[in-house]
Image: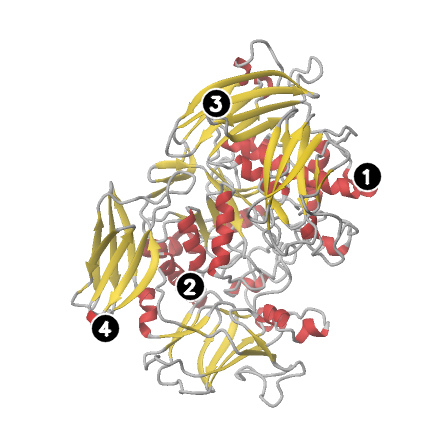
C-alpha cells in the first residue's frame, strides 16, 4: 500500500565509473582525480549499470568492447546535489532497490550495506544533509567472489544455472540463466532513489485490510507508532465519499474501521467491472492539513479450491477460468519501467482477453505501478516469491532473516490490491527436487510449508497461499493432481489431444515454443533482415534452450511443423527459408488455438492456464507471445481470439464428431445467433443456424452431429472417403449481424502446400487515427491470412477466411511513420501475396 506524496526524485546528474581492478571493499568508488580509463558518464536512475553504459554513450559500448561480466566487476555511481527547498530535519533518503552487494555513503560517511536486491532502504538523513553540494555514492561489489566462497553444497543441481551457489544470495536469476535470458545480470541501483519527509513513508507501516460481508464493505486500518497529529482515512468512488477518523490507543497505534454500504465489488474484467475506491490519508487539520493519496483499494472475495472436484479460483463466489501469461520485465536490463509503460502493457493484456498475469520466481518483484495497472484493468495477479528451482539454505538464520524482511516489505506494498489473488511460495522447487530423484520428504521444506504461509497470513489473510507453482499431485508436476508446468504439448512433444487426456487442472505455465516474430522484429537482430537464417549464431542467440540439453525449443516447434503440417522442416528451411518462417509462425498459432479450445470447452477439467512468457527478453525467436518491444506474434492473435469473454470454439471429439462451445463469461446474458458452415473449394456446401441466449458465466455445448439432417463426418474420424469439407466455420453474431467470434476446423488437417489461384481481394483505406483499414474478400478458402504493412500493426492477424467471406481489419500506426506504407496480405495456402498500397502512397 504505497503512499504517494511530496518526494524529490534523485534522477538527474548521476555519474558512473568502472572501479579500477584491485579496489578493496570499503572504498566507495574511484578517486575523483583518477576515475578510470573510461572516464565518468552521466546516467539516469533507476537504470542499472548496463543500461547506463549503453544509454550514456560511454564505456564498453562506446568503445566497441565486448560486454563485461558484471558479476565479476565493481561499479560506482555518484550524484552531487543540493538539499531540496522545503525538506526539513525529518528527511528520509529512500533507495528502493540495490543489486546486489552494495555500499552507500553520503558526504563520505557510511549509510548502509545491502546484500538483498529485493529490500528497500529508508535512512534518516536530516542531520547529514548539507544545504549545498551533497555527494551520494553507491558502490556495487562483485558477486562472483562471494559465489566462489566455500559453502555447503545443495542437495540437487539446477540445470538452467551455471552457478549453484546463487541459492545463498537474494538476487534475480535474470541474466544468470544463459539458456533463456541475456547474460547481463542486474547490477547497481535498479529502483528509484529519492528524498522525502518522514510522512512519505508512513504507509510502509500501515496495516490495511479491505473486507467484504455480503453487500457491505469494510476497510480496517492501523498505523503503529502514529504521530500525534489528527488523521483521517477517506475513500471515494464517483460522487460517493466515505470518511473515518483514526483514533490512537494506549500503545500509540492509530486505528479506524470504515463501512461502505452497497459496496461495488472488484471483478476480473472478463467477469465484471473491476471497481476501485480511491483512498487517501489526511494528516493534520485546518490549514496545516496534508492529504496523502494512497493506492486505490478494491473489495472482493477469493477462494482457492483444491479437492476431488478440481483446482481453481473463485472470485466473489464465482468460478473463474484464469487465463493469461507469465509476466516478463519490460526491459531485463532496466527492470523498472514508467507508470505509463505498465499501464500500456497491462492494457494490451486486457485487450487479448487475458485475466491473469503470473510474476514468476526467477524474475523480480514488480513495483506498485504494475499492481495498480492490474487493479484498474481487472487483471488478476498470481505472485510468486522470488524463489525458484534451487535448494535454499532454510536452516541458515541469516538467510531466513533477510528473506523475512524482504517478504514483509512486499506484503506491506500489496495490501489493498484486489488484483492479487494468489501468493505462491516458489517457482518449481518441488518439481525440480522430484524430477532430479530426491526422496519425497525433500521436495518441500519448512520455508514453504510453515514460514511463508505464516508471514502471508499475518499481512494478507484474505489472499490464498500455495506452496509452489507445481504442487498438489502425487508428483508435483502431475497435470491431473493440482497445479503444474504443462509442457506435454510443447517440450515433451505429445500430440495435441494430450492437453485434454492429461486432465490438466491448472497450468501455471505452458506452451513454450521458440516463436518466430514478425519481420520487423527480426530486423533488430545483428545482421537481421531477410538474409538472416535460423541456423545463424545471431539467430540462435535468441532461441531458448535448457543448458546441457541436446535440443532447443526450435526443435520443439519443428516437431509440430512436421506432425501437424506434414512438412520436413529441415528440407523446407534449406530450399524455401521464407516459407519455413511462415509455416513456423502458423503452426504455433494453430497449436495454441487448439489447446486453449480444449481447455475452455464445456466439461473441461482445466480451470486455468498461463502461457510461459508474455514477451521476449531479447530480440529473436524467444518464448514470448509478444516480441521484445511488445509487437504481437502469430500465436498472440490466436490466443486473443480464443480467450475473449464471449466467444465460440470448435473441438474434435473423435468418433462423436465436432462439438460447438458457446462461451459467455460476462455477468449479463447475451442474445446471439450461431451458424456453422461447411465449405469446399469456392462454395458453401451446407449451413446451419440457430438463435440462442448465452447464459451469464456459462459455457454451452452443441453437438454438431445433431445439427445437420444427415450423417456428415465433420471430424473425418470414420474416413469412409475424402473429408466432407475443406473447412468447417462457426460464427457467433449479435441479432443485428455483428460478428462476436469465429472458430474454424479443417477436417483433412492443415494443408502445408500452396496453389497459384489468386483468390484474395484487398482494398485499403486511410483511418482517422493515421492508421489504415483493409477490406478483405476471399473468393476461395484462405488459411493463415496475415498482413504485413510497414509501420502498422493489425488488430487481428493469422486468421482463416471461408469462401465468399469479407472482413474489415483495422491497422494501427506505431513507431516512426514510414515514407511509404506499402505492404502485403498473404495466405499460407496461396503462393502469391496481394500487394497493399494505401491511397496516396506510391513508390519511394
Mark 4 sits on what residue? 288
Query: What is the spatial separation of the Cα atoms under label 2 and label 1, in whole angstroms?
Result: 53 Å
Query: What is the spatial separation of the Cα atoms under label 2 and label 3, in whole angstroms?
Result: 53 Å
124 and 495: which is toward the camera = 124
SS category of the residue bearing label 3: strand
Q: Quadrant of residue 144?
A: bottom right
N-terminal of the pair, mark 3 or mark 4, is 4
From what the image shows, is residue 751 above or below residue 689?
below
Q: Quadrant of residue 692?
A: top left
N-terminal of the pair, mark 4 or mark 2, is 4
Of all residues shown, which one is farthest toward the left? Answer: 250
N-terminal of the pair, mark 4 or mark 1, is 4
Looking at the image, which residue is at 54% across and 64% down? 152
Which of pointers 4 and 1 indicates the residue nearer the eye?
Answer: 4
Mark 2 sits on what residue? 406
Looking at the image, which residue is at 60% across and 73% down? 145
From what the image shows, is residue 163 above or below residue 350?
below
SS category of the residue bearing label 1: helix
Mark 1 sits on what residue? 571
Of all residues shown, which one is farthest toward the front? Answer: 840
Query: What is the spatial separation of the Cα atoms under label 3 and label 4, in whole angstroms?
Result: 62 Å
N-terminal of the pair, mark 3 or mark 1, is 1
From what the image shows, is residue 177 above or below residue 761?
below
Do labels 3 and 4 touch, CB within 8 Å?
A: no
Amino acid at each position: 500500500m504505497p503512499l504517494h506524496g511530496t518526494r524529490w526524485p534523485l534522477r538527474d546528474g548521476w555519474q558512473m565509473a568502472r572501479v579500477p581492478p584491485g579496489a578493496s571493499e570499503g572504498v566507495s568508488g574511484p578517486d575523483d582525480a583518477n576515475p578510470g580509463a573510461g572516464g565518468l558518464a552521466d546516467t539516469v536512475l533507476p537504470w542499472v549499470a548496463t543500461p547506463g553504459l549503453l544509454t550514456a554513450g560511454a564505456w564498453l559500448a562506446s568503445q566497441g568492447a565486448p560486454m563485461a561480466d558484471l558479476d565479476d566487476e565493481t561499479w560506482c555511481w555518484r550524484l552531487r546535489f543540493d538539499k531540496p527547498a522545503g525538506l526539513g530535519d525529518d528527511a528520509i533518503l529512500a533507495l528502493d532497490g540495490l543489486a546486489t552487494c552494495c555500499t552507500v555513503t553520503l558526504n563520505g560517511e557510511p549509510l548502509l550495506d545491502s546484500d538483498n536486491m529485493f529490500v528497500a532502504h529508508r535512512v534518516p538523513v536530516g542531520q547529514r544533509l548539507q544545504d549545498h553540494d551533497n555527494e551520494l555514492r553507491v558502490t556495487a561489489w562483485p558477486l562472483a567472489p562471494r559465489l566462489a566462497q566455500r559453502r555447503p553444497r545443495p542437495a540437487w543441481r539446477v540445470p538452467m544455472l551455471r552457478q549453484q551457489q546463487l541459492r545463498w544470495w537474494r538476487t534475480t536469476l535474470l541474466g544468470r540463466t544463459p539458456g533463456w535470458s541475456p547474460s547481463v545480470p542486474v547490477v547497481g541501483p535498479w529502483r528509484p532513489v529519492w528524498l522525502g519527509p518522514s510522512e512519505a513513508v508512513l504507509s510502509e507501516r500501515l496495516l490495511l485490510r479491505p473486507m467484504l460481508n455480503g453487500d457491505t464493505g469494510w476497510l480496517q486500518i492501523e498505523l503503529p507508532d502514529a504521530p500525534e497529529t489528527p488523521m483521517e482515512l477517506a475513500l471515494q468512488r464517483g460522487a460517493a465519499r466515505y470518511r473515518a477518523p483514526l483514533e490512537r490507543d494506549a500503545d500509540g497505534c492509530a486505528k479506524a474501521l470504515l463501512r461502505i454500504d452497497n459496496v461495488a465489488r472488484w471483478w476480473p474484467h472478463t467477469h465484471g467491472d473491476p471497481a476501485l475506491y480511491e483512498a487517501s490519508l489526511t494528516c493534520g487539520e485546518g490549514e496545516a492539513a496534508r492529504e496523502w493519496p494512497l493506492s486505490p483499494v478494491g473489495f472482493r472475495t477469493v477462494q482457492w479450491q483444491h479437492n476431488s472436484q478440481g483446482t481453481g479460483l473463485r472470485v466473489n463466489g464465482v468460478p473463474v477460468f484464469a487465463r493469461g501469461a507469465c509476466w516478463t520485465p519490460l526491459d531485463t536490463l532496466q527492470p523498472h519501467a514508467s507508470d505509463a509503460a505498465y499501464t500500456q502493457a497491462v492494457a494490451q493484456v486486457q485487450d487479448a482477453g487475458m485475466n491473469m498475469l503470473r510474476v514468476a520466481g526467477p524474475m523480480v518483484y514488480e513495483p506498485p505501478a504494475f499492481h495498480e495497472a492490474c487493479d484498474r484493468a481487472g487483471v488478476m495477479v498470481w505472485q510468486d516469491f522470488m524463489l525458484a528451482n534451487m535448494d535454499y539454505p532454510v536452516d541458515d538464520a541469516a538467510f531466513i532473516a533477510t528473506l523475512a524482511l524482504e517478504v514483509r516489505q512486499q506484503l506491506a506494498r500489496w495490501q489493498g490490491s484486489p488484483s492479487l489473488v494468489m501468493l505462491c511460495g516458489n517457482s518449481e522447487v518441488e518439481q525440480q527436487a522430484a524430477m532430479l530423484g530426491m526422496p519425497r520428504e525433500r521436495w518441500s521444506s519448512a520455508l514453504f510449508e510453515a514460514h511463508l504461509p505464516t508471514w502471508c497470513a499475518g499481512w494478507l489473510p484474505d489472499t490464498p497461499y500455495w506452496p509452489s507453482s507445481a504442487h498438489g499431485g502425487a508428483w508435483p508436476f502431475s497435470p491431473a493432481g493440482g497445479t503444474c508446468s504443462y509442457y506435454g504439448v510443447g517440450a515433451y512433444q505429445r500430440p495435441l489431444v494430450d492437453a485434454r487426456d492429461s486432465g490438466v487442472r491448472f497450468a501455471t505455465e505452458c506452451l513454450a515454443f521458440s516463436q518466430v516474430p514478425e519481420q520487423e522484429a527480426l530486423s533488430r537482430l545483428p545482421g537481421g533482415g531477410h538474409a538472416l537464417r535460423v541456423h545463424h549464431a545471431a539467430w540462435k542467440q535468441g532461441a531458448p534452450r535448457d543448458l546441457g540439453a541436446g535440443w532447443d525449443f526450435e526443435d520443439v516447434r519443428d516437431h509440430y511443423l512436421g506432425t501437424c503440417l506434414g512438412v520436413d522442416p529441415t528440407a523446407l528451411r534449406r530450399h524455401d527459408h521464407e516459407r519455413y518462417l511462415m509455416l513456423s509462425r502458423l503452426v504455433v498459432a494453430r497449436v495454441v488455438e487448439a489447446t486453449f479450445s480444449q481447455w475452455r470447452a464445456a466439461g473441461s477439467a482445466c480451470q486455468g492456464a498461463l502461457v510461459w512468457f508474455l514477451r521476449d527478453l531479447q530480440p529473436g525467436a524467444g518464448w514470448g507471445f509478444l516480441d521484445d518491444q511488445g509487437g504481437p506474434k502469430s500465436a498472440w492473435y490466436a490466443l486473443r481470439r480464443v480467450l475473449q469473454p464471449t466467444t465460440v470454439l470448435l473441438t474434435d471429439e473423435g468418433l462423436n464428431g465436432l462439438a460447438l462451445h458457446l462461451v459467455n463469461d460476462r455477468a449479463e446474458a447475451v442474445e446471439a445467433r450461431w451458424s456453422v458452415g461447411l465449405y469446399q473449394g469456392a462454395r458453401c456446401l451446407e449451413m446451419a443456424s440457430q438463435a440462442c441466449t448465452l447464459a451469464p458465466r456459462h459455457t454451452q455445448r452443441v453437438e454438431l452431429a445433431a445439427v445437420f439432417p444427415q450423417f456428415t463426418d465433420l471430424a473425418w474420424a470414420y474416413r469412409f472417403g475424402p473429408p466432407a469439407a475443406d473447412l468447417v466455420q462457426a460464427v457467433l453474431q449479435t441479432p443485428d449481424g455483428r460478428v462476436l467470434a469465429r472458430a474454424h476446423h479443417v477436417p483433412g488437417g492443415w494443408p502445408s502446400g500452396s496453389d497459384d489461384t489468386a483468390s484474395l481481394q484487398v482494398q485499403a483505406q486511410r483511418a482517422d487515427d493515421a492508421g489504415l483499414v483493409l477490406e478483405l474478400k476471399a473468393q476461395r478458402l484462405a488459411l493463415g491470412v496475415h498482413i504485413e504493412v510497414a509501420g502498422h500493426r493489425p488488430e487481428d492477424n493469422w486468421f482463416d477466411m471461408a469462401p465468399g467471406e469479407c472482413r474489415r481489419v483495422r491497422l494501427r500506426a506505431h513507431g516512426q511513420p514510414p515514407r511509404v506504407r506499402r505492404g502485403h496480405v498473404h495466405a499460407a495456402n496461396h503462393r502469391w501475396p496481394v500487394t497493399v498500397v494505401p491511397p496516396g502512397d506510391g513508390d519511394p
